[in-house]
């Protein structure tokens, strides 16, 4: 299904530049991704108990999408989908770890040499490429580390379990580990998220003449809820985790504000498109935060609360301010969108389509349907087809069917009333799945 990377590069050079809606421009691209942030954690989506002024401003100055989806319900596969443009029925990484005997240590499956990432696509178009935060797609020495997948500069966590602490004794800079001296011996002297923001700001300053691609897969607000202090929520009569979680989101918001302010200071905000989203659905579903809002589910499952993400895009002068869009799209659409922004061809055989028209308020081609699967919990599958959503909670189980326009919370299973639709969406599930040796499916026929 995929071409070898060198063959893709040769094809790219032969094909040349793709058509681009705004001739002659190749904007800088910044993609900021929170970790485990729910759509309803942000004020612009209705959150009332967490302060997010920078992201609310970003939404007011750009476009806020209400039906954008993560690549998966957990960390590593969602990041793989984002980087490769392949949904989880086709992607190399489909869960955080494989339990198949003979898998790499910890079961963590790396990207291969032949996998083509969005960073490589943009690098081929002359972009400087940088990443800071959490990677999760390759352990040290494998082909999956960022510097071997198209990134010029890298600082952060390779391993997602290593990223569970905000006070690590070391992180990775390119292919060498770097001691975080303030945290040695159990001390908590350096909150690592601040290092990621420093890297991002410095990367933008050094590459201000562009074009550049900066990918910021931040680690907040993933638990453990470690934060230097819980301001401005210290006086709230909430549980400790709630105060810390809210403080983490507000600190993240402040760092996004720093990036937007720097773009304005350098006078490159009009030549830079900034995306903001989360890697999967909500985790802090308890009061008073309720990150999933009215949606059913949370991180780890394929109900809306597990895969719906905030998505805000800002590009002054190009994206009309204050827009709210119900365009349905997902992480596998980012690679072809970035390719069109850079006026370069996307690799063949991917699942995504460019969402640049939707970003610019133009007529947009829609997917026939969106598909997800997750091997955990019995092997879930889900399909979104227009306003219909089908969910299978284990391999071979009957399909549940919901109409999201009338039942956004997926409370009323209407499968029994629509047998023909159930059959059609079940067929989408069958044709979207390609077997993986790392995540084999149960030996159960899917005839319904």
Image (spheres, rainbow, N blue to C red):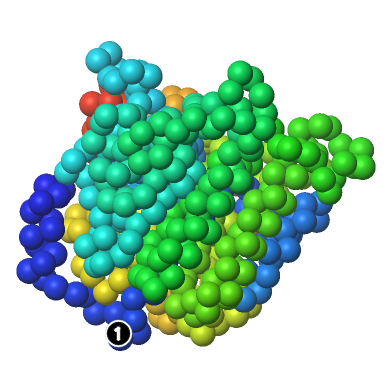
**Is 138 on the left or on the right of 312, as rendered?**
left
x, y percent for residue 77: 39, 39
**Is 247 on the left or on the right of 69, as rendered?**
right
User: Is the C terminus in the top left, top right, bottom left or bottom right quadrant?
Assistant: top left
Residue at 46% from the left image edge and 39% from the top image edge:
156
- Give the quarter of the image for residue 115: top left
Residue at 39% from the left image edge and 73% from the top image edge:
209
Q: Is residue 318 visible?
A: yes
Is 76 placed above or below 331 here? above
Residue at 17% from the left image edge and 43% from the top image edge:
114
Instruction: Name the foreground residue: 365 vs 353.
Output: 353
Is 408 placed above or below 17 here? above
Residue found at the far front of this picture: 181
| Residue denoted by label 1 | 24
x, y percent for residue 224: 65, 29
Q: Secondary structure at mark 1?
A: loop
x, y percent for residue 188: 67, 28
Residue found at the far top of this picture: 101
Instruction: Name the foreground residue: 279 vs 172.
Output: 172
């Amino acid at each position: 299904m995929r071409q070898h990377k060198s063959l893709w590069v040769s094809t790219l050079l032969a094909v040349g530049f793709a058509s681009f809606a705004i001739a002659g421009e190749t904007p800088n691209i910044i993609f900021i991704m929170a970790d485990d942030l729910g759509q309803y954690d942000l004020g612009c989506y209705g959150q009332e108990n967490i302060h997010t002024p920078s992201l609310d401003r970003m939404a007011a100055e750009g476009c806020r999408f209400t039906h954008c989806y993560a690549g998966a319900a957990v960390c590593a596969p969602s990041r793989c989908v984002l980087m490769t443009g392949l949904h989880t029925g086709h992607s190399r990484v489909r869960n955080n770890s494989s339990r198949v005997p003979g898998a790499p240590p910890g079961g963590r499956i790396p990207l291969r040499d032949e996998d083509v990432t969005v960073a490589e696509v943009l690098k081929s178009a002359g972009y400087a490429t940088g990443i800071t935060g959490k990677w999760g797609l390759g352990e040290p020495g494998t082909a999956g580390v960022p510097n071997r997948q198209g990134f010029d500069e890298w600082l952060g966590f390779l391993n997602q379990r290593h990223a569970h602490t905000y006070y690590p004794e070391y992180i990775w800079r390119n292919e060498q580990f770097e001691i975080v001296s303030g945290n040695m011996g159990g001390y908590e002297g350096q909150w690592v998220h601040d290092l990621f923001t420093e890297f991002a700001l410095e990367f933008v300053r050094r590459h201000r003449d562009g074009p550049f691609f900066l990918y910021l897969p931040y680690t907040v607000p993933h638990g453990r809820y470690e934060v230097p202090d819980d301001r401005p929520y210290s006086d709230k009569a909430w549980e400790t985790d709630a105060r810390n979680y809210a403080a983490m989101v507000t600190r993240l918001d402040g760092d996004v504000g720093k990036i937007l302010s720097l773009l304005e200071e350098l006078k490159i905000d009009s030549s830079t498109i900034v995306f903001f989203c989360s890697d999967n659905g909500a985790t802090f579903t308890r009061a008073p935060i309720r990150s999933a809002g009215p949606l059913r589910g949370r991180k780890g499952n394929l109900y809306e609360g597990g895969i719906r993400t905030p998505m805000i895009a800002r590009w002054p002068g190009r994206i009309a301010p204050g827009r709210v869009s119900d365009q349905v799209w997902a992480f596998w659409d980012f690679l072809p969108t970035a390719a069109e922004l850079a006026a370069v061809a996307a690799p063949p055989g991917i699942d995504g389509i460019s969402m640049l028209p939707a970003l610019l308020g133009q007529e947009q081609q829609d997917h026939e349907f969106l598909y997800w699967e997750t091997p955990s919990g019995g092997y879930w599958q889900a399909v979104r087809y227009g306003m219909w959503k089908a969910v299978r909670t284990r391999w071979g189980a009957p399909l549940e069917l919901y109409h999201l326009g009338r039942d956004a919370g997926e409370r009323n299973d209407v499968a029994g009333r629509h047998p023909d639709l159930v059959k059609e969406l079940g067929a989408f599930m069958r044709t979207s799945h390609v077997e993986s040796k790392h995540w084999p499916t149960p030996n159960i026929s899917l005839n319904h």
